Image (cartoon, grey):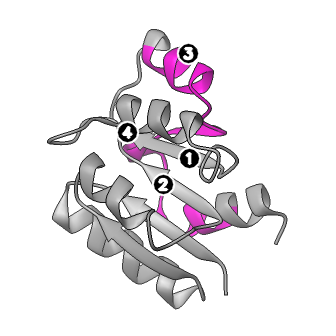
């Protein structure tokens, strides 16, 4: 079963993503901030990470930096899902290793599942 870590501080969105991805057959874990995400990664190795940028305790940019520096997490593909649409934010996230960048309001849960399947070659 394909494992996915959802890192999203909005409780409604994280529950919606989690429900949709679980229904689609993925094994998911949810982190509500960057510190929790990095902690979950110590015992759960996902095939993909969905990462919000604006979160409490540790933002998504910091999480991307830490993922890149850790040999065990540096090859995990990351889809950034955020409300930040500025070119600088997109460029920064992609430079830090994100494989895709999505504005939350531009994607529905079915499109998210399709994007994950495509990125993972499923």
Q: Quadrant of residue 8?
A: bottom left
Identify the residue position indicated by label 1 in the image. 79
The numbered mark, 1 or 3, whose residue comes first in the sequence reads 1
The numbered mark, 4 or 3, whose residue comes first in the sequence reads 4
Task: Determine the secondary structure under disc 1.
Answer: strand
Task: Determine the secondary structure under disc 4.
Answer: strand
Identify the residue position indicated by label 3 in the image. 91
Q: Position of residue 20 (x, y in %)?
A: 46, 79
Q: Position of residue 64 (x, y in %)?
A: 48, 35
Magenta-span inclusion, residue 110: yes
Q: CA distance from mark 3 to mark 2?
A: 17 Å
- Observer-nearest residue: 105 or 55? 55
Task: Determine the secondary structure under disc 3.
Answer: helix
- Observer-nearest residue: 2 or 111? 2
Can you tell which of label 1 and label 4 is closer to the viewer? 1
Residue 82, disc: 4
Does the CB distance between marks 2 and 1 fall below 8 Å?
yes
Magenta-span inclusion, residue 36: no
Region in magenta: 89-114
């Amino acid at each position: 079963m394909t494992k996915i870590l959802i890192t999203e501080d909005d409780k409604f969105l994280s529950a919606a993503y989690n429900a949709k991805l679980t229904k689609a057959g993925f094994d998911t874990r949810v982190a509500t901030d960057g510190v929790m995400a990095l902690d979950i990664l110590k015992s759960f190795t996902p095939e993909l990470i969905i990462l919000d940028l604006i979160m409490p305790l540790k933002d998504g940019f910091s999480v991307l930096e830490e993922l890149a520096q850790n040999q065990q997490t540096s090859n995990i593909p990351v889809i950034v899902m955020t409300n930040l649409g500025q070119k600088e934010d997109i460029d920064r996230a992609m430079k830090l290793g994100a494989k895709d960048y999505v504005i939350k309001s531009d994607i529905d849960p079915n499109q998210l599942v399709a994007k994950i399947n495509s990125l993972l070659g499923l």
